[in-house]
Image: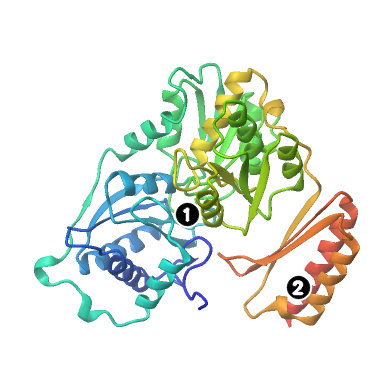
Amino acid sequence: MSRKYFGTDGIRGRANGLITPELALKVGQAAGLAFQRGDHRHRVVIGKDTRLSGYMIEYAMVAGFTSVGMDVLLVGPMPTPAVAMLTKSMRADLGVMISASHNLFEDNGIKLFGPQGFKLSDDVEKQIELLLDEPIEKRLAQSASLGRARRIDGVHDRYIEFAKRTLPRDLSLDGLRVVIDCANGAAYKVVPEALWELGADVIPIGVEPDGFNINKECGSTSPEALSRKVREMRADIGIALDGDADRVILVDERGHVVDGDQLLAVIAQSWKEDGRLSRPGIVATVMSNLGLERFLKGQGLDLVRTPVGDRYVLEQMLSGGYNLGGEQSGHIILSDYATTGDGFVAALQVLAVVQKLRRPVSEVCHRFDPLPQILKNVRHKGGKPLDDSEVKSAISDGEKRLNGHGRLLIRSSGTEPVIRVMGEGEDRVLVEDVVDTIVFALGQAAAA
């Protein structure tokens, strides 16, 4: 069964386009019914980022959940990993994060977490989709059994203490000048405060959300502003989160970007030396650079690859017994601490290594030379450009040209109408030419 609503990371789309109040209400009802198990009073935790449309979706979902008899705990703007953590700690039956992650304000989305704080499996999402398309009027709560909604105070402090406890008790960030870019998103309050409490000299940017500026020329997908600020302030490190703070990109003292692959390498080597890896290896996706795989092999560690999506990384981590995994984009999952990607906690692990080694970030966070990797996106208006004969021919020719000395990965995005073309190999000129040829063929097919 193909999925109608859910993509690789919940339901996402244009606010008041795909993500309407009607859909949000139905998702609340369907998810509420799917997670009613037993006779206890059921509850759901709802957090959001700073998008203007968050108000609309939040209240529509409150109506949906309360109409099927679930109580609602509203925590306001909070990082996605904080909502996952609060879902478990508050013994809720379900958690909701209203966010479109790294997308601009025009989009929004709905991410769901089960009672243990994990994102839902494909099977559970399919159950919810079936309920979305069924009439459920007869399953609504009786008047006396309707749910209540209330706002919860103090959750920022709970997340700050949780994040601080992931570091050794005696570790301080004294002496570190840190620029933190919160992407005008969900972490704009909690993360700068947590860094200050840990002793860092904090320079915050991207902390003035207005409903429209989330991820706009800031955050992990646009680190240029952070790079400029790090150089301007002569900071030791820059940290860029995305709109819901489940991914992170770092910038070293020279203003150079450090991606998720390098962060995985830093944490993996540190944890191996400290005996903290539960298995001799980590989990990453097919997008991670071959340079990371070679570096880990030199450390005696395996790299297990999964499809793109932090959900699939986590599933492999749980089934294989790994406690470290992530994506090149900066989704880093540390399962000893969190049930989903946590950009801030991942950054803290790297800061701990920086403090331990007392070396510049440009040295600490350069563990391997990545192979040339070219990634280009082709936007389309629907249809199936990948089924076009010319596109298939271009892909086949490209694989022959790389001849085992590189790899191609072509996939449709699970969150937007985009086809991503990635090529990797030792000869950058060849890889770029192969990718450009495929992108041209896809562009022709998309325009047809």
Residue marked by disc 1: 212
Residue 446 shows up from this direction: no
- Depth order, front residue of 319/179: 319
Kindly report the distance in space between the C-alpha atoms of the residues bearing marks 2 and 1. Answer: 31 Å
Whether residue 197 is visible to the viewer of this picture, yes or no, is yes
Coloured how?
A: rainbow
Mark 1 lies on a secondary structure that is loop
Q: List x then y, in percent, for residue 116.
A: 36, 50
The image shows residue 94 at horizontal and vertical percentages of 32, 57
- Residue 145: which quarter of the image? bottom left
Say which residue appears at 46% left-offset and 38% top-offset: 336
Between label 2 and label 1, give the one nearer the viewer: 2
Say which residue label 2 marks: 443
Q: Badge 2: how crowded within 10 Å, few (<14), some, or many (20+)?
A: some
- Horizontally, is 226 left or right of 344 in the view? right
Q: Can you say which quadrant of the picture contains the C terminus?
A: bottom right
Q: Which mark is residue 370?
A: none
Q: Label 2 is placed on what type of residue? A: Gly
User: Which residue is nearer to you in this view: 234 or 76?
Assistant: 76
Seen at 50% across and 74% down, the residue is 3
Is residue 66 shown above or below 316? Answer: below
The reply to whether discs 2 and 1 touch (Cβ–Cβ < 8 Å) is no
| Neighbourhood count class around disc 1 (C-alpha, 10 Å): few under 14, some 14–19, many 20 upward | some
Rendered image quadrant of residue 193: top left
SS of the residue at dot 2? Answer: helix
